[in-house]
Image (cartoon, rainbow, N blue to C red):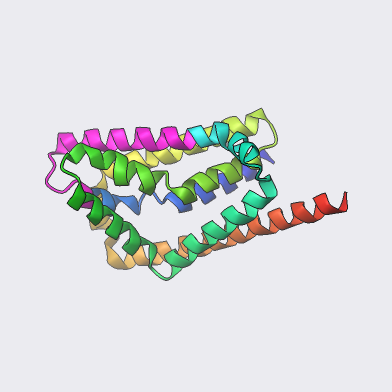
């Protein structure tokens, strides 16, 4: 059903990109910026990150075809990549890695606006895991309506990233360290289950193709 597909796609992409979890990273890389500058950075980062995700939504399968990679193979590889991300979330390693990326970006960027591209747009919004999730979910779309629905899901999540950036101060104060830790671990378990499903679907497709 279309509703089930869109709910699954939303859960996968939301957990992978984690808009709420990006709020502390945004505060870190825009430290010292004026409110107006922060808004401009937030807008630029989400537009660039969203454009990259939409690019892979439209051309992802074509890229796989050019490289000679089958969809089942990408499902398995993408599922393994998402599973690694899930393990990092459960054991509280992902936020540490993201923080290190943000700190390196700040130390190497002279122009504050450059952080909108790196690390906010790439890789925090549209990193390898997010791109993999987009291609995986688009490969499961059965018709044009499903693809349009998936485009809407991506737009909603990118919008959530923008809102998270604008409300970063409040989100950090409201969540606190304990709540953030619990939510991250729960989302990690959910992502692990979804990634295992991707792997299982890929293996099933390989078996079905081999039996034809």
Can you name the residue that lies furthest to the right here?
212
Front residue (pair 106, 23): 106
On the picture, is 22 further left or further right than 187? left
**Does the stretch in magenta take in 53?**
yes
Asked which quadrant contains residue 194, the reply is bottom right
Relative horizontal placement of residue 58, taking residue 185 as reference (left or right): right
Residue at horizontal 47%, vertical 53%?
Answer: 15
Residue 163: tell me if it is visible: no
Q: Is residue 31 left or right of residue 16?
A: left
**Quadrant in which the N terminus is drawn:** top right
Residue at (20, 49) in percent of width and height: 108
Give the image location of residue 115, x and y in percent: 25, 42
> Where is 187 relative to 23, above or below?
below
Most frequent secondary structure within the magenta stretch:
helix
Let me know if residue 125 appears in the view.
Answer: yes
Image label count: 0
In x, y percent, where is residue 172? 25, 55
Is-magenta flag for residue 184? no
User: x%, y% of residue 129?
Assistant: 48, 51
Residue visible at 31% across and 37% down? 45
Q: Is residue 151 above or below residue 82?
A: above
Query: Which of 5 and 53 lies nearest the eye of the viewer?
Result: 53
Residue at 42% over, 43% down: 126
Taking the view exactly as shown, the residue that stands out farthest to the bottom is: 91
Q: Is residue 68 above or below residue 149?
A: below
Q: Tell me where the magenta segment starts and ends, as one range.
A: 28-54
């Amino acid at each position: 059903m279309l509703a089930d597909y869109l709910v699954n796609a939303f859960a996968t992409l939301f957990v992978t990109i984690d808009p709420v979890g990006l709020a502390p990273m945004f505060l870190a890389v825009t430290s010292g910026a004026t409110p107006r500058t922060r808004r401009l950075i937030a807008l630029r980062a989400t537009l660039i990150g969203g454009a990259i995700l939409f690019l892979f939504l439209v051309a992802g399968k074509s890229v796989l075809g050019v490289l000679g990679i089958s969809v089942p193979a990408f499902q398995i590889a993408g599922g393994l990549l998402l599973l690694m991300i899930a393990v990092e979330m459960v054991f509280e390693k992902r936020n540490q890695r993201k923080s290190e990326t943000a700190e390196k970006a700040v130390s190497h960027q002279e122009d504050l606006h450059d952080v909108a591209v790196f690390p906010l747009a790439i890789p925090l919004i549209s990193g390898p895991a997010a791109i993999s999730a987009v291609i995986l979910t688009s490969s499961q779309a059965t018709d044009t309506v499903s693809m349009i629905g998936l485009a809407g899901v991506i737009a909603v999540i990118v919008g959530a990233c923008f809102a998270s950036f604008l409300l970063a101060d409040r989100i950090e104060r409201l969540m606190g360290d304990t709540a953030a830790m619990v939510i991250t671990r729960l989302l990690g378990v959910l992502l692990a289950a979804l990634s295992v499903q991707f792997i299982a679907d890929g293996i099933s497709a390989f078996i079905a193709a081999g039996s034809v």
